[in-house]
Amino acid sequence: MKLRLFLYLLMIFTTLESTAQDPVFTQYMLVPETLNPAFTGLANAWNAGLLNRRQWPDGNRRMDTRYGYANNMVTDQLAVGGNVLNHHEEFTNYNYFQLNGAVSYRVELDYDWRLRMGIEGGYGRKNFNFRNLLLEDQININDGSISGGSIDPGVLHGTDKIDFFDVSVGIVVDQENAWFGAALKHINRPDISFTETGNMPLDMFLTVHGGYYLTFERASLRFLPDDTDVLFTFNYMRQSQYNRLDIGGMLEMPMFTFGVITATNPERKSGNGHFITSVNPIVSMKSGEFTFGYSYDLNISKLGHTQGVHELTLTWQSNHTCNRCDNYKVRLKRNGEAGYTH
């Protein structure tokens, strides 16, 4: 029994080390800073938020991811910000922490379109508690007793934590009702091996994303409030062998937003793979300068009873735009993003 537990833990740890997948978020349209550093300062005002994601809350399988950010424009073209992420897996006791600073620069392409370029970098740490592992040479097969230590080279020459420097870049082109962007994370590919002699570069994470706002005329749909929009959005992600495409739509009213995001697996690696892996309803409510969001990822794959994924967001956007930024005024969107008009 104990040997099987050790082998199972070792298998999970090996998988974790080889894939090292980044956490992903369902409500990326509410917190676009999770996607791309070029979104830093998009709102042209003080903008901050918190995100809490709990995946598979059924006992030891639980994974918790927390993200926080703040940013603002400092000139008519330059924005600065920062963000912090912490991801913890209950069963393996694996923890991933990252603290980044971000800068973006905006260039006017013409009267309607802008180009934003962003870069972020900072400190990362990955922890894995080897002391929780029970290794084979600690077990006395005669009486079942457990010794205090192991001579396994992975423990003797390994480490419980990895510290590294990480860099990501991104671009976004946008206008008042549409945006399209791409980002590449971990471009310096830091070494994340837990052993002294190991060499395990962190896989780069590619994301390509976009959205389009369709605005309804009051005369066409009288049962909807004024300033009601529909957002069509997508987000493609790829890291090593992992890939995912989120597509969906959001009905955005002045106070409430309702939508559905569908998570798909477009490059199925096996015949048993599902194209649609989850269907994720989203609801948000705006109150003053704050927006509260909730989403639930309903698993429809063969993973079994996972109790889904719960995600909560709280974002704040100041109604006072940058007083140093020429003659722009902000058009607030219900999801916390903004477009600009002259």
Image (spheres, rainbow, N blue to C red):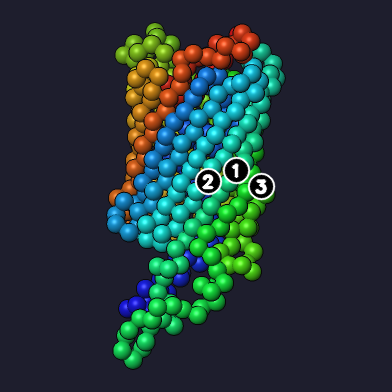
**Picture quadrant where residue 67 is located:** top left
Q: Which residue is mark 2?
A: 98
Which label sits in the foreground, 2 or 3? 2
Helix, strand or loop for disc 2: strand
**Picture quadrant where residue 207 is located:** top right
Structural distance between the alpha carbons of marks 2 and 3: 15 Å
User: Image check: 332 left or right of 122?
Assistant: left
- Residue 39 seen in render: no
- Residue 216 seen in render: yes
| Badge 2 or badge 3: first in the primary sequence | 2
Amino acid on which the number 3 mark rests in the picture: Ile
Helix, strand or loop for disc 1: strand
The quarter of the rendered structure image containing the C terminus is top right
Rendered view: 154 above or below 77: below
Amino acid on which the number 1 mark rests in the picture: Gly
User: Image check: 106 left or right of 226?
Assistant: right
Amino acid on which the number 2 mark rests in the picture: Gln
Structural distance between the alpha carbons of marks 1 and 2: 7 Å
Q: Which residue is mark 3?
A: 187
Q: Residue furthest bottom?
A: 142
**Picture quadrant where residue 146 is located:** bottom left
Q: Nearer the viewer, residue 339 or 251?
A: 339
Rendered view: 279 above or below 48: below
Determine whether label 1 and label 2 are within 8 Å by CB. Answer: yes
Rendered view: 40 above or below 168: above
Q: Which residue is mark 1?
A: 122
User: Image check: 270 left or right of 311?
Assistant: right
